[in-house]
Image: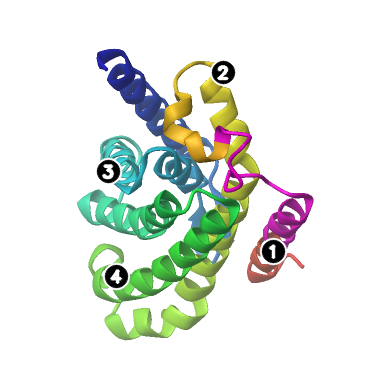
Amino acid sequence: MQDKRTKKMVTLAMLAALSYLLMVFIRIPLVSFLKYEPKDVIITIGAFIYGPVEGFLISMVVSIVEMVTVSDTGWIGAVMNLVSTVSFACIAGLVYKKNHTLKGAVIGLALGLVSMVIVMLLWNYLLTPLYMGYPREAVVAMLPTVFLPFNLIKGGLNAALTILIYKPVVTTLRKAHLVPVSEQAAETDPANPHKFHISVGAAIGAILVLATCILAALAGMDII
């Protein structure tokens, strides 16, 4: 039991570290001044493996470390990062915990995207004037033109990337004996009809979503 708990803590720490490194080194402009960081993909994978509580813990650790190292938006930026990630990753992880199938993952990610978009529109309305110094009227005008498309594209990228890399990541962790079979019984048991399996159609669908989000981002930056 102690060994299992230790491996879980090591895995969570690894996922948090990887998420932080992706945030530091991969920052892609999407819409206006807003940048996309793929850290939420790793946090969502953590929520898929262990559940929404663990997804929240990873997100909280990454947000705090980001605040004290590279962020220039202080505690408000940390709160915004935490709310954004949790509203996506934890909702997706909660649904997937109830239904360990590809269908459950897709539904969870879709609900996470919707949740994140709605929650972030509200939180941008409330907090963006405080940490960016914009008049609230200006922020209201930016909700449909900046924050809405940004969060839609961000959520689409997160969902597509999670679908594409979740299985390889879990397989790698399992081969390293960090994720025991019992943690993912529904998707590792060949006799279980509900196991997580990426079909060709699902992969093509995720790639199409990914391509659509990239094209939308390029259009938003007036590159195409």
Q: Is residue 190 left or right of residue 207?
A: left
Q: CA distance from mark 4 to mark 3?
A: 17 Å
In this figure, which residue is indicated by the disc labeled 1?
218
Instruction: Identify the residue shown where x is 45% and y is 46%.
Output: 44
Amino acid of disc 4: Trp
SS at mark 4? helix
Q: Nearer the viewer, mark 2 or mark 4?
A: 2
Seen in the picture, residue 119 relative to 66 is either above or below; the reply is below
Q: Please give the range of residues in magenta.
A: 188-212
**Residue 107 appearing in the image:** yes
Amino acid of disc 3: Met
Amino acid of disc 1: Leu
Q: Earlier in the sequence, mark 3 or mark 2?
A: 3
Q: CA distance from mark 3 to mark 1?
A: 31 Å
Residue 60 marker: 3
Q: CA distance from mark 1 to mark 4?
A: 26 Å
Instruction: Give residue 64's position: percent from left, percent from top.
Output: 26, 40
Q: CA distance from mark 2 to mark 1?
A: 38 Å
Amino acid of disc 2: Lys
Instruction: Give residue 214's position: percent from left, percent from top.
Output: 68, 59
Q: Is residue 175 left or right of residue 141?
A: right
Instruction: Give residue 96's position: percent from left, percent from top.
Output: 45, 52
Q: Earlier in the sequence, mark 2 or mark 1?
A: 2
Q: CA distance from mark 3 to mark 2?
A: 27 Å
Instruction: Identify the residue shown where x is 61% and y is 46%.
Output: 193
In this figure, which residue is indicated by the disc labeled 2?
175
